[in-house]
Image (cartoon, rainbow, N blue to C red):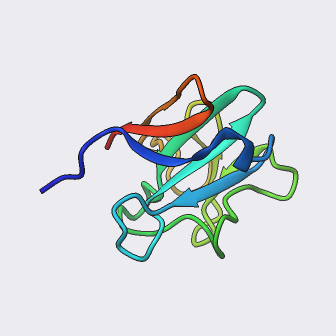
């Protein structure tokens, strides 16, 4: 049975501008989604590289961005993804993209997963 939506992930203040963070909304012991904050915008994706559908992106917890924090990177394949669109811009999965997830920020600043 799927969890009821929305699911509270964190408060907006817990996401540093220009940083990424993984979340485990299903409570399975491994992050299944990642969120990147760019100013007031949040970008959420499934934590799975499209090159191999079951490969997590981070090389360590919350390590989803390249050194310059301009792209999401798959540590397993070196693929780079545009933060805003999730499109692969370099690597073995060109033409593919990360799977977006629906997020919202409520009036109190809570970041909510609204569907999976």
Residue at figure coordinates x 64%, y 72% from the top left: 61
Q: Residue furthest right?
A: 68
Residue at figure coordinates x 57%, y 59% from the top left: 22
Count of labels in the image:
0
Quarter holding residue 105: top right
Quarter holding residue 114: top left
* Rendered location of residue 107, percent (x, y): 58, 22
Residue at figure coordinates x 67%, y 27% from the top left: 41
Residue at figure coordinates x 45%, y 43% from the top left: 96
* Rendered location of residue 92, percent (x, y): 53, 57
Quarter holding residue 86: top right
Which quadrant would the C terminus be assigned to in this image?
top left
Q: Please indicate, yes or no, whether residue 28 appears anywhere in the rendered image.
A: yes
* Left or right relative to 18: residue 36: left
* Left or right relative to 94: residue 100: left
* Rendered location of residue 57, percent (x, y): 55, 64
* Rendered location of residue 94, percent (x, y): 53, 45
């Amino acid at each position: 049975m799927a969890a009821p939506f929305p699911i509270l992930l964190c408060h907006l203040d817990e996401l540093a501008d220009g940083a990424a963070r993984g979340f485990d909304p299903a409570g399975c012991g491994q992050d299944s989604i990642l969120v990147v904050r760019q100013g007031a915008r949040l970008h959420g994706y499934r934590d799975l590289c499209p090159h191999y559908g079951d490969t997590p992106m981070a090389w360590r917890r919350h390590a989803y961005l390249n050194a310059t924090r301009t792209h999401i990177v798959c540590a397993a394949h070196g693929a780079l993804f545009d933060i805003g669109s999730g499109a692969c811009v370099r690597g073995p999965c060109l033409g593919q993209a990360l799977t977006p997830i629906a997020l919202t920020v409520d009036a109190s600043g809570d970041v909510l997963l609204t569907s999976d």
